[in-house]
Amino acid sequence: MGFKEFLRHIFLIDLIKGLKLTFSYQRPSATYTEQYPLERPPVAERYRGAPRLNNNPETGETLCIACNLCSLACPENLIVVGWERTEDRKKKLTTFTYDLSRCMFCGLCEDACPVDALELTQDFELAHYNRQGMIWDRQMLEEGPQPVRYTR
Ligand code: SF4
Ligand code: SF4
């Protein structure tokens, strides 16, 4: 260890430099507190949050054609698509289950969907008090989460 290095150790120069940097961010003018939930923070445009199963806005019918591609694309195997055959041999969606507690929001299911029925939205309030609440059925996926909206 050189003499200069020795003096740095003795006088705690590195510690003082670190503290100086830390305290430079403690000024009231440098602090910013988000007033959530009274003010909702803006979410990045490409943020992937709560899943939604889209309906046709005109007819109200689901856009999902029960092809099961989203389920096959999911590395977590957390999507279960239920369907039945109609009289004209078409597939008709009956149930749709999405286990949010295992989702990593990678978006592969959304990309696999050929009709843009499944979409990861910008809704970020997904907390539940139990695991069961994280398993969303078709109705929940179509209606989306309904978080309490606080106002000032
Ligand atoms: S976002 Fe990823 S992990 Fe979540 S359901 Fe879709 S494919 Fe699966
Ligand atoms: S990929 Fe799209 S259309 Fe196919 S089952 Fe999934 S949500 Fe429905």
Image (cartoon, rainbow, N blue to C red):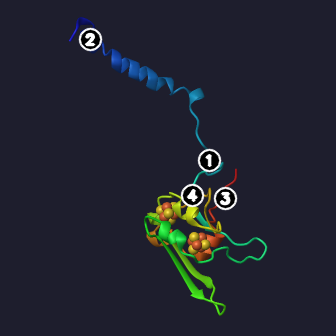
The secondary element bearing badge 1 is classed as loop
- Amino acid on which disc 2 is placed: Glu
Label 1 and label 4: CA atoms lie apart by 11 Å
The Cα atoms of the two marked residues, 4 and 3, are separated by: 18 Å
For marks 3 and 1, give the CA distance.
20 Å
Is the residue under label 2 in contact with that under label 1 (CB below 8 Å)? Answer: no
Residue drawn at point x = 59 percent, y = 67 percent: 113
User: Which quadrant would residue 3 be assigned to in this image?
Assistant: top left
Vertical order, 33 against 26 (above or below): below
- Foreground of the two, 145 or 16: 145
Kind of residue at disc 3: Arg
Mark 4, other Cα within 10 Å: few <14 / some 14–19 / many ≥20: many
Name the amino acid, label 4: Gly
Q: Which residue is mark 4?
A: 49
Mark positioned earlier in the residue sequence (2 or 3): 2
Please report whichever mark, 4 or 2, sits nearer to the chain's N-terminal start. 2
Residue 43 in sight from this viewpoint: yes
Pointer 2 local density, CA inside 10 Å: few below 14, some 14–19, many at least 20: few
Percent of width and height locating residue 105? 51, 58
Disc number placed over residue 149 in the picture, else none: 3
Residue 31: x %, y % from top left: 56, 32
Instruction: Tell me where residue 109 sits by quadrant.
Output: bottom right
Label 3, secondary structure: give it: loop
Furthest residue in direction top, as rendered: 3
Q: Which residue matches tag 2?
A: 5
Disc 1 to disc 2, C-alpha distance: 46 Å
Query: Residue at horizontal 45%, vertical 26%?
Result: 22
Label 2: state its secondary structure: helix
Residue at the spot of label 1: 44
Query: Foreground: 93 or 148?
Result: 93
* Nearest to viewer (mark 4 / mark 3): 4
